[in-house]
Image: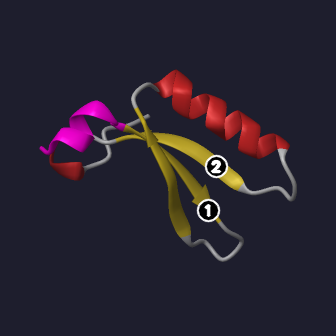
Amino acid sequence: MNDSTTTLPWLVVRQDDNGNRYRVGRYATRAEAQKIVDRLDADGPKRLYWVENIGQNGKNGGG
């Protein structure tokens, strides 16, 4: 596990209309990441955003 995974384990992910997924940012806490999701959900055209947790070895640890 690298230092960035340890200190910024929460991801905000966006999925477009074609099913492509993009990492929007990494955050130290779930609450911080959720604030970003809430703000993005309120802006402009509807997109799908969610929070994920990076587990050990870069695998999704649930969220």
In the rendered view, tell whether residue 47 sits above or below residue 33: below
Range shown magenta: 1-9
- 1 vs 60, left or right, is left
Residue type at mark 1: give it.
Gln
Mark 1 — residue?
Answer: 15
Residue type at mark 2: give it.
Tyr
Could you say which quadrant of the image residue 3 lies in?
top left
- 23 vs 16, left or right, is left
In the rendered view, tell whether residue 25 sits above or below residue 37: below
Q: Residue at x 64, y 29 (%)?
A: 35
The quadrant the C terminus occupies is: top left
Q: Residue furthest right?
A: 44
Report how far apart the C-alphas of labels 1 and 2 lie in the structure: 7 Å
Total number of numbered discs in the rendering: 2
The residue closer to the viewer here, 26 or 47, is 26
Q: Is residue 6 magenta?
A: yes
Q: Secondary structure at mark 1?
A: strand
**Mark 1 residue crowding within 10 angstroms, few (<14) / some (14–19) / many (20+):** some
Could you say which quadrant of the image residue 54 lies in?
top left
In the rendered view, tell whether residue 12 sits above or below residue 38: below
Q: Secondary structure at mark 2?
A: strand
For marks 1 and 2, the one nearer the N-term is 1
Query: Where's residue 56, x and y in %?
Result: 17, 41
Q: Is residue 33 magenta?
A: no
